Amino acid sequence: MVCDNESLADSRKQKNWDEILPFVTFAYNTAKQETTGFTPFYLLHGREAETTLDTMLPFCPKDFDDNNITKIAARAEESRHLARVHTLRAQDRDRRRYDSKH
């Protein structure tokens, strides 16, 4: 995804890459990563990013009581740990693949 987006921004016809970059960044940060299984935004903030459409939908305040906030924080921490485990497994798999060829 990054390569495709970078080539889009680097196109010889593309003179406004600086205007496109925030959209490319948002797309990357909200795309589920194969290695971790989560979006970078979720791992950083403990929730998925909100789009313009999300802000137009009705607000549900029940999600923000103290008990739910604690659960959300715990789930975010578990997700970060799981992402780390997935990353280490992927690194080990890549290392073994590299070592078998060299």
Image: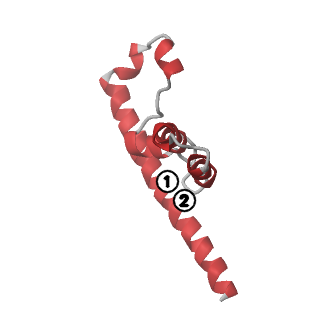
In the rendered structure, the answer to whether residue 78 lies left or right of residue 102 reads: left
Across and down, in percent, residue 85 comes to 50, 60
Please state if 21 lies on the left or on the right of 1 as rendered. Answer: left
Q: In the image, what residue type sits under mark 1?
A: Leu
The residue furthest top is: 58
Residue 14, image x, y percentages:
58, 43
Contact, CB < 8 Å: mark 2 with mark 1?
Answer: yes
Looking at the picture, tell me which residue is in the foreground, 21 or 34.
21
Q: Nearer the viewer, residue 88 or 78?
A: 88
Is 40 drawn above or below residue 95 in the view shown?
A: above
- Residue type marked 2: His
Q: Residue at point 40% right, 34% down?
A: 72
Which residue is identified by label 2? 86
Residue 85 vertical position relative to residue 80 in the rendered view, above or below: below
Check disc 1 and report its element: helix, strand or loop: helix
Q: Which residue is mark 1?
A: 82
Q: Which mark is residue 36?
A: none
Disc 2/disc 1 C-alpha distance (Å): 6 Å
